[in-house]
Amino acid sequence: MNRTAWPGVPFPLGPTWDGSGTNFSLFSENAEGVELCLFDESDREERIAMRQRTAHTWHVYLPGVGPGQRYGYRVEGPWKPADGHRFNPAKLLIDPYAKAIEGPIAFDRARVLAYAPGEEDVRDAEDSAPAIPRCVVTDETFDWEGDVRIERPWAETVIYELHVKGFTRLMPDVRDDLRGTYAGLASDAAIEYLRDLGVTAVELLPVHHIADEDLLVARGLSNFWGYSTIGFLAPHAGYAATGTRGEQVREFKGMVKALHRAGIEVILDVVYNHTAEGSHLGPTLSFKGIDNAAYYRLQPDDPRHYMDFTGTGNSLNPVNPSVLRLIMDSLRYFVTECHVDGFRFDLASALARELYDVDKLSAFFDVIHQDPVLSQVKLIAEPWDVGPGGYQVGNFPILWSEWNGMYRDTMRDFWRGHTAVAEFARRFTGSSDLYQSDGRHPSASINFVTCHDGFTLRDLVSHERKHNEANLEDNRDGTDDNRSWNCGVEGETDDPEVNALRDRQTRNFLATLLLSQGTPMVLAGDELRRTQQGNNNAYCQDNELSWLHWEPDERARGILEFTKRLLRLRAEHPVFRRPEFLTGEERQGSGAPDVWWFRPDGRRMTQADWSRGDAFTLGAFLNGAEIPTLTADGEPVVDESFIVLFNAWRDPVTFVLPPARFGRRWAHELCTGDPELGPNGTTHAARARVPLQGRALRVLRRVG
């Protein structure tokens, strides 16, 4: 075929359709030649040499080529693995800037390793095209019907972490053909559930295009969580109900629009720290074959091998300006073109490493902070990686919130009687020791007890040991540091006392999480008592072990209703979601401090009390008249005041309420030990004695 090819332009990178044709542009600093490979409906390949090169960017414009065109790249260059160069034109490569990718890697159809079998230094000659999914040119037009980002204040945000497929795969009120897809999450049934629950944002496990690891495929498994990215601008095709030739992009946008219409923000979990290409012995799918030495961090004294701060075999190289640009272009695309509201950065410490150490002044942060678009969205860091010095909780810069791993560990330890009240109080009040000194607010602390990685909440109170046999790794995978307590029996039981204690512990965790200062994150399904049967690393379980079940028994219905009640309480009362840290002082003229801690005898906590390592009971007065913030109209925020009583010890305790200056009468609001009991008119006078059973929490509201 004698196809017309024009020089084109180097930017923007990727495929750009202008209504008459498509410009293709690919960055490769060390390549010696690039071929654009077009595929027709019969999968016949047409190769077009890209002869124009500007600033290490290869480009060509093809008149008449438009949306739906399937394509890939072949890149020629030196084959010198010892020097970090792994070019092999026999391997078809995925465009890093593709907006749509057709599907999975077909490992059984062709060899995707760039080296010959058993000979790491010999370039393999087998064509990988039969195994590699095609990229697709897309039409980016979409009718947003006036949709814009919600921009909900952090103090009003409640995050719900979910998996696009796992959330609706078994949801009975979703159409069969839409279950487990973007359209399923956009369905009336899914959105009605989220709204009724009371969450304000969904944090989606990775939705960038995913490539399963060949070792998992060989075991009949897949990377369900999706932390195995190969396309940073392409919504994963496997979550689309409507098609994979660009339809997945429109379906993803439609999902965002539907969630926004319901007042729910969309936060994406993004994986820019590594790719699906694994170690130096892993497959050549994209970056490794386009320019290995540019895209990846290589060992300075041994560039055959990667620096691995992620535990996956490789680390992407954001120190390279073109790789950093790829990350920023991906982020901007999902904000400007797909209207997402924020991002959670997986293993974010890896992105902040300049030469080696984690640096909060790194170029990665500089570029985001000066960007007029990205600096205005929700930015959440997973503040650790697996490299030396990678645990950086509390050390990310202003504008960033962080998954607070210290909160998780403290709350798990407190409710099993392993952490005393001082550390518990620090975490309950927003972790000012971590976030206040650099000008951040309580919302910088993303509080969570469970997340996708680890035990579900039901398993946290039912197992002390992991049970990961289904992963086919002889139970070696997954952490052994669970900080869990099985309440006396390992696994499921029909013992009514054990089950009652487990349900009370579940309510304790949920109440603590949703009444803490900071931004709460609930793991999808915890409110339904979802179990993974003790598997704390279900990353490869794309089955009913990971999917949510929607036929709750009586116990699950009780937990669900209690969770809704807590979320309503938090939404209605800003005293539980203050935008500023508590001080322990009176500053608004209310006659009492913003918080006052007391012992079970009703007396103020002393330094000696805080220093005790065996104290597991605590009372907190939260003053609704001491909230130092204004409404959008400039009016002061004034709320009711509450007392929260905590007893993490096994035995009952009787609290004496504070003196009358904190409140003359107090009404019951909720109790984790008696979840059916709601506000019923019963009140307690100041200095009254209020009983609280072992391992329980009670909330009282001031009524006089």
Image (cartoon, grey):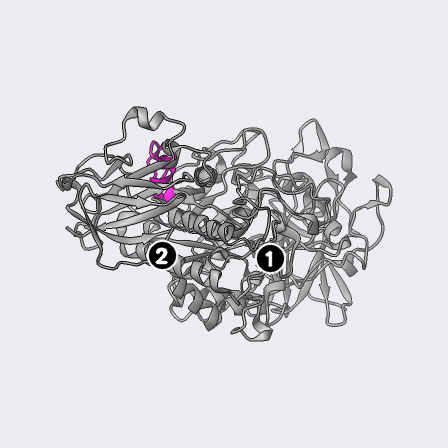
Compute the Cα span from label 1 to label 2. Answer: 24 Å
Neighbor class of circle 1 (other Cα within 10 Å; few <14, some 14-19, many 20+) is many
The secondary structure type at the circle numbered 1 is loop
- Decide: is 498 above or below 265: above
Residue 200 visible in this rendered orientation of the protein: no
Q: Is mark 2 on a helix, strand or loop?
A: helix
Point out residue 524 in the picture as x, y percentages from the top left corner: 49, 57
Question: Which quarter of the figure has residue 464?
Answer: top right
Q: Residue 463 carries which label?
A: none
Instruction: Give the farthest residue toward the right.
Output: 118
Q: Is residue 431 magenta?
A: yes
Residue 96 placement, left or right of 334:
right
Numbered tag placed on residue 567 in the rendering? 2
From the top left corner, tell me how far across and down residue 373 is, in percent: 41, 51
Amino acid type indicated by mark 2: Leu
The image shows residue 302 at horizontal and vertical percentages of 72, 29
Residue occupying the point 39% across, 43% down: 694
Residue position for label 1: 546
Q: Quadrant of residue 387?
A: top right
- Magenta region: which residues? 425-444
Q: Along the horizontal axis of the image, is 211 left or right of 556? A: right
The amino acid beneath tag 1 is Ser
C-beta proximity under 8 Å, tags 1 and 2: no
Please state which of residues 127 and 555 is positioned toward the viewer in this rendering: 555
Answer with mark 1 or mark 2, whichever residue precedes in sequence.
1
Rendered view: 517 above or below 149? above
Q: Is residue 401 visible?
A: yes
Q: Is residue 445 above or below residue 135?
A: above
Q: Which of 222 and 261 is in front in this view?
A: 222
